Amino acid sequence: MDLARVIGTVVATQRDPLFEQVKLAVVQPLDDSLEDCGMPVVAIDALNRSNGDIVYLVRSGDAMFAHYTDTNVPTDCAIGGLVDDVNVLLKRGER
């Protein structure tokens, strides 16, 4: 799982039938100190998160089952949940 910040939504006038009831969000991956890292990605948003929310992403084959419906939607990235707090344990000597 990876941390990310919701930064937008995807609007499509035509969709594959499997995606007709699916909200798509643009998310910016984050590092351990909640700084941007990497390029934004599109993720299925079954939880209806808002811009600015910190979320965790489910990637790869597991993302297909994160949509919480009877139909499995083919995807590589889905929002798995909302992050309330982040605590990072450092090794001795690190800052």
Image: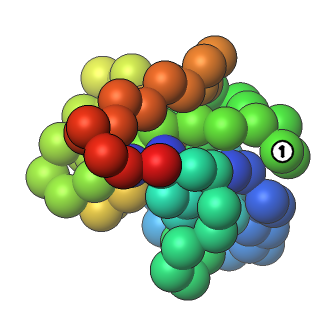
The image position of residue 62, as x and y in percent, is 18, 42
Reading the image, the residue beneath label 1 is 52
Label 1 SS: loop
Relative side of 64 to 52, left or right:
left
User: Which residue extends farthest bottom?
Assistant: 39
Residue under the image location 28 percent in, 53 percent down: 59
**Residue 53 in view here:** yes
Q: Nearer the viewer, residue 85 or 54?
A: 85
The image position of residue 89, as x and y in percent, is 35, 29
The image position of residue 43, as x and y in percent, is 51, 57
Residue under the image location 55 percent in, 82 percent down: 39
Relative side of 59 to 48, left or right:
left
Q: How many marks?
A: 1
The image position of residue 86, as x and y in percent, is 54, 27
User: Which residue extends farthest left?
Assistant: 61
Category of crowding for the residue at label 1, using alpha-carbon neighbours closer than 10 angstroms: few (below 14), some (14–19), many (at least 20): few
Q: Nearer the viewer, residue 12 or 6?
A: 6
